[in-house]
Image: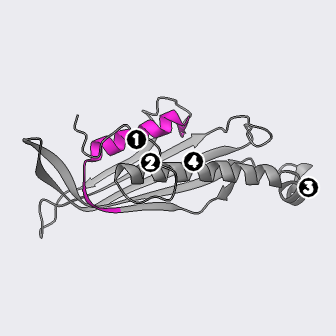
Amino acid sequence: MPTFVRLPNLEVIYRDMWVMQPLYRATRQWFLENEYVDSQGDRSMDSGMEILYWIKKGTTMNPNEREFRIWWRTQKLPVNVGTAGSAFYKHHLDIDWNAIQTVDMEIMRDGKKEKVQFGELRILIKAYIEMPDVSKTPILGWFDYWFRTRLIKKNIEENRKMLYQDAYRLQGMIKKYLELKSFLPAEEVFHEKFEFI
């Protein structure tokens, strides 16, 4: 059974118009560019990244309104940089998309009607580090506390810092895409907010 070191969650809350498909693709592309793989280790991320895609269609009060939830589970083996990166640690970034009170609308853009979504979008980013549990092994079990608090404490802190940076960069990319204020240096985004494919 592995041991987990959890980091505080990050969240993006947005209530306005957006187009889901380009945002979905831009976020997926960010994971591919930053060498994250799905939970089964598949680099294409087609099979196991998305573990839930749920849509609830309209209610009796508003039949056009929809709600959807999407859960992504990704992992990354850190690159061997100094003493911090090794196969001993796995970095996980879990994304929970939740859109409520979403309705499809049509807007005029460059003289053409285009379909957009309007509603409240919440994106929760959960980051944690996975390490093997050595407390169950006969010899290392006695040294587990010392092992984690003394011997590898610096490595755990370096891995936490690396994963924090990834989580904040992902949040910054999503905020830049949605044109929200961010406190990080701006990364160049190659997708427009209303990119239609």
Q: Secondary structure at mark 2?
A: helix
Are the residues flagged by discs 4 and 1 in contact, CB closer than 8 Å? no
Is residue 30 within the magenta segment?
A: yes
Tag 2 residue: 173
For disc 3, the neighbor class at 10 Å (few under 14, some 14 to 19, many from 20) is few
Give the mark nearer the N terminus: 2 vs 4. Answer: 4
Residue 111, quarter of the rendered image: top left
Residue found farthest to the bottom:
61
Mark in the foreground, 3 or 1: 1
Q: Secondary structure at mark 4?
A: helix
- Side of 185 relative to 113 (left or right): right
Is residue 18 within the magenta segment?
A: yes
Give the mark nearer the N terminus: 4 vs 1. Answer: 4
Q: Nearer the viewer, residue 188 or 158?
A: 188
Which residue appears at 36% of the width and 48% of the height?
A: 177
Question: What is the CA distance from the residue labelled 3 to the residue labelled 2?
Answer: 42 Å
What's the amino acid at mark 1?
A: Val
Give the mark nearer the N terminus: 3 vs 2. Answer: 3
- Up-down: is 119 above or below 23? below
Which residue appears at 34% of the width and 39% of the height?
A: 191
> Residue 50 at what x, y percent from top left?
42, 43
Give the mark nearer the N terminus: 4 vs 3. Answer: 3
Which residues make up the magenta segment?
A: 14-39
Are the residues flagged by discs 1 and 2 in contact, CB closer than 8 Å? yes
Tag 1 residue: 189
Tag 3 residue: 143
> Which circle marks residue 166 in the picture?
4
Q: Secondary structure at mark 1?
A: loop
What's the amino acid at mark 2?
A: Met
